[in-house]
Amino acid sequence: MKNYKLTKTFKNLFISLLIVNSTLFAANIEKIHFLIPGGAGGGWDGTARGVGEALLKSNLIKEASYENISGGGGGKAIAYLIETANKQQNTIMVNSTPIVIRSLQGIFPQSFRDLSLISTVIADFGVLVVKNDSKYNSWEDVKKAFKKNPGKIKIAGGSSRGSMDHLVAAQIFKAANGNPRDVRYVPYNAGGKAIAGLLTGEVDILSTGLGEVLEKHKKKELKIIGVTSNKSIEGIPSFKSMGVDAYFVNWRGFFAAPNLPKKKIDEFAKILEDMYKTEEWEKIRKRNGWENLYKSKEEFKLFLENQEKIISSLMKEMGFL
């Protein structure tokens, strides 16, 4: 009888330990506050709201909120996250390749090393876009006009000079045997404003991410003339298929406040990884033309360090650094 009681006691203790252990490693996040370093309508905004939508619809979280803080090429939001770190335990900030570019340029003093790395989430290719009634109906039209008089073509982007939108456009024209320094780049303080500038005729071409304009392209509100992927996407020709060796992919991912507990970082990374398994995410991903790209913590860090070396070399070559 005593042995039975002893065995039963150990069994109950073992079950209790299993429950505690599983609780420790389960994602315990009910709400996420998304910090967006740019204005409404841009790639960061679309990514944060798309991820939030997928997490809510798949019941992985119960509540999502969003905060847009634009300025300083994204530096204002980064500084805010660092300065208010103690209050930002449920906050993740979306960012992408520009955090590497702008840090190299000294636009802001911080870098990805000053934040807690959560994970990359998607890959978004670059595109060149025109109005539907533009005089430029194809890449051939644009290439001829650029060769004749590059200063006449105004190319917009939703970020500052020497930024990713600028670099992508420069890379495309360089690959087409043009001088990348001849690109007449017009900066806007958000992707939505750059699209508006294209639609009102302030600029001739828009350099942006595929996800920002794919729906407008499908609705024939805009026309994408080429994408920086290896192959065509959604019927849009790749620059490679048109004889221009211009490949570029922009990652988008999430960071948290510095010194966030490892357990919380793991929970954020796990919930984003679980999101990939949901039908809700697949619909949103396909709608935006995004490619899945998941790298968490150490893998994310190595990825960023390698990208920093490649971009630094490219920027020096093009005279942007």
Image (spheres, helix red, strand yellow):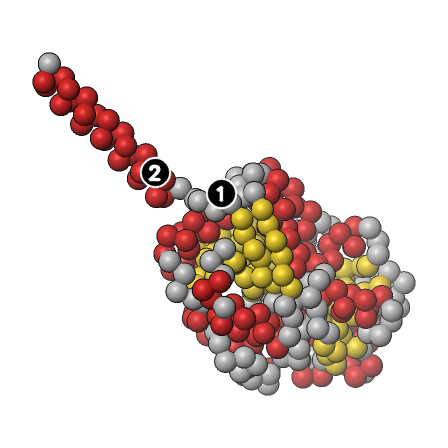
Q: Position of residue 81 (x, y in %)?
A: 52, 68
State whether residue 189 appears in this view: yes
Q: Residue at x 49, y 62 (%)?
A: 87
Q: Position of residue 83 (x, y in %)?
A: 49, 72
Q: Residue 99 appears in which quarter of the rendering?
A: bottom right
State whether residue 247 appears in this view: no
Secondary structure category for the residue under label 1 = helix
Q: Is residue 183 left or right of residue 279?
A: right
Q: Position of residue 275 (x, y in %)?
A: 53, 44
Q: Is residue 18 left or right of residue 181?
A: left
Q: Is residue 176 left or right of residue 268?
A: right
Pick whichever of labels 2 and 1 is earlier in the sequence: 2
Question: How many C-alpha atoms fall within 10 Å of the one at disc 1: few (<14), some, or many (≥20)?
Answer: some
Q: Position of residue 27 (x, y in %)?
A: 43, 44
**Disc 2/disc 1 C-alpha distance (Å):** 16 Å
| Foreground residue among 167 and 8 | 8
Tag count in the figure?
2
Instruction: Look at the picture and state if 27 lies above or below 111.
Output: above
- Amino acid type at image mark 2: Ser
Quarter of the image for the N terminus: give it. top left
- Which residue, given by chain and number where applicable, does mark 1 sit on? 274
Q: Which mark is residue 22?
A: 2
Q: Residue at x 52, y 77 (%)?
A: 103
Q: Residue furthest top?
A: 1
Q: Are marks 2 and 1 in contact (CB under 8 Å)?
A: no
Of circles 2 and 1, the one toward us is 2
